Amino acid sequence: MSKQQFNLIVFDWDGTLMDSTAAIVKSLQDSAVDLGLPEPDRKQAAHVIGLGLKEALETVLPDLDPGLYPKLVDRYRLHFLENSRKTTLFEGVREMLDDLKSQNYLLAVATGKSRAGLNRAMDEAGLRAYFDASRTADETWSKPHPAMLLELTEQLGEPMKRTVMIGDTTHDLQMANNAGAAGIAVQYGAHSPAELQLLHPLYSAGSVGDLHRWLNENA
């Protein structure tokens, strides 16, 4: 019997592996300003990180004429391409993934990004080879619906009870709860530690180093 508690470790991308929260917030704000719409403050913009883009925009600007959403999406994508040029992986991410891969964990990504956006980000970071599978918000239901985790566990042949979801938002943890998976919070992303704790994560990591140590000792 393996001593491992989990076989499949699923990561969120933005705010969990990639330090991109500020770029997403600025892109949402810049997009609203372009169209003469009310500019969301940082807390409002950060709260929708992790949702699919359509769901995020509808949440942060709920009274917008539906006909303007396609224009807002286009502006967001343009701004994010520019604002994300300087984004980097959080310190210790590559070393953590190297270590987990060497221990034969299955690794996956569940993200609010589009497939094109995730592929581009993975390639720019040189991380694509680490992951056995991934799901994006334009392929299935957006978080916190459990579909991403249900589909990943089915694809990789792992039971939900041997799966853990790691993310920086309540959307990630609520998805884990909805799917029946364990959830781990990281405190260095979009949502506050107090918000994350309301979803009762198995562990709440203050840094990538903390997360790496916990996984080695407990996963």
Image: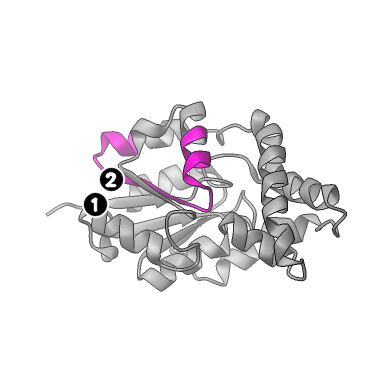
Q: Residue furthest left?
A: 1
Amino acid beneath label 1: Leu
Q: Is residue 89 visible from the viewing direction of this image?
A: yes
Q: With respect to residue 135, does 18 lie above or below?
A: above
Work out whether 164 lies above or below 114. Answer: below
Q: Secondary structure at mark 2?
A: strand
Q: Is residue 132 left or right of residue 62?
A: left
Q: Residue at x 20, y 55 (%)?
A: 157
Q: Position of residue 5 (x, y in %)?
A: 27, 57
Instruction: Give the side of residue 173 with respect to residue 160, left or right.
Output: right
Horizontally, residue 206 falls left or right of residue 95, namely: right
Residue at 63% of width from left, 33% of height from top?
87
**Dot 2, how many residues are within 10 Å of its Cα: few (below 14), some (14-19), or many (20+)?**
some
Looking at the image, do the residues carrying marks 2 and 1 touch, with CB atoms under 8 Å apart? yes
Which residue is identified by label 2?
106
Q: Amino acid at mark 2?
A: Leu
Which span of residues is magenta-colored? 99-120
Colour scheme employed for the rendering of this structure = one colour
Between disc 2 and disc 1, whose residue precedes? 2
Image quarter of residue 40: bottom right
Q: Which residue is mark 1?
A: 156
**Residue 147 at what x, y percent from top left?**
39, 64
Residue 207, by quadrant, is: top right
Q: Does the magenta portion include 17?
A: no
